[in-house]
Amino acid sequence: MPRQGIAMGLEFIEGNEAIVRGAIRAGCGFFAGYPITPASTILEYMLHLLPAEGGVAMQAEDEIASMGLCIGASMAGRKAMTATSGPGISLYSENIGLAIMGETPLVIVNVQRQGPATGSATKGAEGDIQFTRWVTSGGLPMIALSPATVGEAYELTFRAFNLSEQFRVPVIVLSNKEISLTQESVDLDAIELPPLVERRRPADGEKYQPHHFETPEQVPVLSDFGGEHVTQYTTSTHDKAGYLTADPGLIQEMIDHYTAKIEAATDDIALFRHDPQEDAETLVVSYGVTSRSAAMAVREARDRGKRVSSLTLQTLYPVPERAIKSAIDGVARIVVPEMNMGQYRLEIERLAPDGAEVIGVNKMNTTLISPDEIIAEGGLL
Amino acid sequence: MSNMAYQTYMTDELGPLPFCPGCGHERLLRELDKALVELQLDPTNVVIVSDIGCIGLADRYFTTNAFHGLHGRSLTYATGLKLGRPELTVIVLIGDGGCGIGGAHLLNAARRNVDLTLVVANNFNYGMTGGQHSVTTPSGGRTLTTPLGNIEGAMDICATAIGAGATWAFRGIGYDDGLAQRIVDGIRHPGFALLDIWELCTAYYLPRNDFNKKELYNLIESTGQEVGLLADKERPEFGAAYRQRAAEIPKGKPPIVIEPAFAHSLERQKGIVMAGGAGQKVKSAVTVLARAGMLSGLQATQKDDYPITIMTGHSLSEINLSPDPIEYTAIDSPDYFLVISEEGLKKTRSWIKRLAPSCRLYADDGLELPDTEARVTRLPLAPAAKEVGRLSNGVIALAAMLQEAAMFPMDAFEQAISRYQKPEIAETNLKAVKKGVELVS
Ligand SMILES: Cc1ncc(C[n+]2csc(CCOP(=O)(O)OP(=O)(O)O)c2C)c(N)n1
Ligand code: SF4
Ligand SMILES: [Mg+2]
């Protein structure tokens, strides 16, 4: 019998286009990137779309320059983004530290591909999860969001801009070739976005210090280079005024600030979907493209009379600990499927109560983890 | 002088400059200050971007904006700042060390011609880290890391930058009288300007090597490098050119939004694989199918696989069509499999062997298929495509499949072609649809 479809007004676009559209919707005014599959089409869309929006998009000479250009442009008042894949993230590392040190808003897209090293350029992966958490020296907190669909790629890129401006930090969007280069039918206009966050700048005539805060978790206002105030920026340990310091007290104060501004906001940054089932003994915790298979596995298990709960994370860092702990509460087994050898499982293991079993479903051969694999290896039936 | 708004751009609020007695950096900064006084720029509109090294301690002794970034990367921040806010005057202070580790940025800043002024405080060694050799250490020079004497050659920073396209370059020594004026000229140059200023590191290079400041010119000469204004050319400044062109281009086309106009008959998700060769328009044919499905109220996903060397080998597209949102996008058990060329067959041979009996396999009748349990339909694609038009094999095969599968009306497929493909291509593909239907009728 012919059926009328559910779909209304859909586009057919790949994840990378959705990322670019989300960025432009958020007011991105500067992009720099260096070609690398599977992130290159972000550079291409940006080069085509940004000039007409009054922005600047350019191909940098390498990934170090991509980051440097974006940091400069951001400090000059533009919302900035760059995009790469694993080999490029390695080269971003030192500048990510600089962006943390200088409290620079910036969005970094990592379209993950099979690694390590050059790996498989055109194959998907989720191998950079802990690499994202510890991406630069110093070990300070990071914010990372992970989309599962083309629609979420759009939404989370937009949200990444908001978070970067709100907390004055680099925010990483952890995409995957499987989302970025897959075309999907999607209605971007139907996606509900939060209000746009604009950079908080000092009020007229206000005395300005680039890193001023009263309490450690407060996020300083930011005066652009070329704005009303003379300002300074430095990679070195510095005080609130941005002046080099070797004073251990002042250094610790800044470190506590970088840490507190993110940790204190963990619950606000947390994006997740909890689909609990009463008396469930098993919980599946998933993220990224693998969460789509996880959703199917959970449905199938339920159809067969099993009681299984599901927690899907869009925010990976800071770890949404409250959400995870509350979802874990009362379950005996936690299944964590990942396209890596068990990276986010480490976060779950440290939060799981004594006696709860944490089971990884892990594969890193460039193919998606199927619902059947999660059911079988996760023991869902 | 006295009626000038800005008498100096330096401040002693942080105490005296932090350099060793006699360090060339101090003298260079005083000349930069004089240059800024001459220009009388608003300090909020000037950024001194400093690299790492002793020279990197300089920026905060100025009353302008200061940006101190990573070792060798100062030009990248400067470029971002200038493109982000074109009205800024951006001056970069870098050591010879920074020019080495940041060599790629030096070449590209010169080539790109963004309006920046790069001042190299060239003291032939890494002062800050204890006097190791740098890219500009003269042959035979003695440093901490050249116990045998420097066997490597010295890089000519100006010649290198000019070779890369620098439009303005000057070489001199830090003790020159007219240095401030040269810096003014560099700042006024509407493009990338480079000043390579040779000077002394009194802590390391001077004591290890037997010369003094008077001999700096001799030192330059001994390396065969030239002094004075070495380039002064005009070439469009990158930022200005970018903005001019950007203002002229139209806004991008609005996205294609597909609203359902037909009905479909799918009860569940179907996976379809098409395997062909490079240049056979596999990808675009499958996108037409996806759009036709969407015109019929279905959801779709498409993934394409082809070698990085795009004009050779296989081209494989996988498409899911579903009445419901699509979750798992891999096609482990295809419902339809189309093989339209030898390259496609080669890539999917082992997959074809594993196909289930429920799978319908459409294959060009010239291909030698492996044993398979799939239900095979042979299509004379090559002669049909010859008749219809080049590169129509994919659409012919899809139309044949669709005619039998009846997922949605053939009208939807035709509409997807005529609405979303270029007229020339659509004309051929509409004929291809007729042909495909004919082949299975
Ligand atoms: C990535 C990186 N590698 C190494 C260093 C250590 N380092 C600090 S200063 C410096 C050399 C600076 O020499 P130069 O640019 O000539 O400046 P000078 O001290 O002579 O003024 C080095 C290698 C660093 N800061 N960062
Ligand atoms: S070490 Fe050399 S470059 Fe550094 S301040 Fe001393 S003299 Fe100057
Ligand atoms: Mg030096």
Image: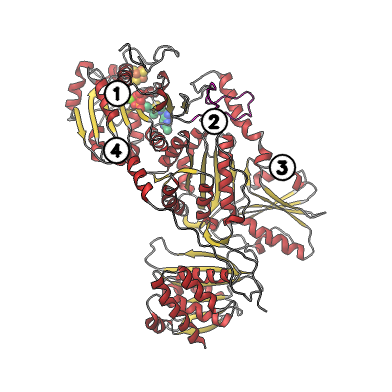
Q: Which residues are magenta?
A: A201-223
**Contact (CB < 8 A) between labels 4 and 3?**
no
Q: Amino acid at mark 4?
A: Ala
Residue that protrudes farthest toward the right in the picture = A279
Cβ–Cβ below 8 Å for labels 3 and 2?
no
Q: CA distance from mark 3 to mark 1?
A: 55 Å
Residue marked by disc 3: A351
User: At 37% across and 43% down in the image, what residue appears?
Assistant: B243
Residue B363 magenta-highlighted: no
Q: Nearer the viewer, mark 2 or mark 1?
A: 2
Q: Do tags 4 and 1 sit on the same chain?
A: yes
Q: Identify residue type, mark 1.
A: Asn
Camera-nearest label, 4 or 1: 4
- For the residues labelled 4 and 3, the Cα–Cα distance comes to 53 Å
Q: Position of residue B417 (x, y in %)?
A: 47, 72
Mark 1 C-beta to ligand 3 under 8 Å: yes
Mark closest to the chain's N terminus, 4 or 1: 4
- The answer, for residue B23, to whether it is visible in the render is yes
Determine whether, in the image, residue B142 is placed left or right of residue A193: left
Q: Position of residue A166 (x, y in %)?
A: 59, 36
Q: CA distance from mark 3 to mark 2?
A: 38 Å
| Label 4 element class | helix
Q: CA distance from mark 2 to mark 1?
A: 40 Å
Read off the residue under disc 1.
B123
Query: Which residue lies under the disc numbered 2?
Result: A201
**Residue under pointer 4:** B110
Under tag 1, what secondary structure?
loop
Q: Could you say which is closer to the camera, residue B48 or residue B201?
A: B48
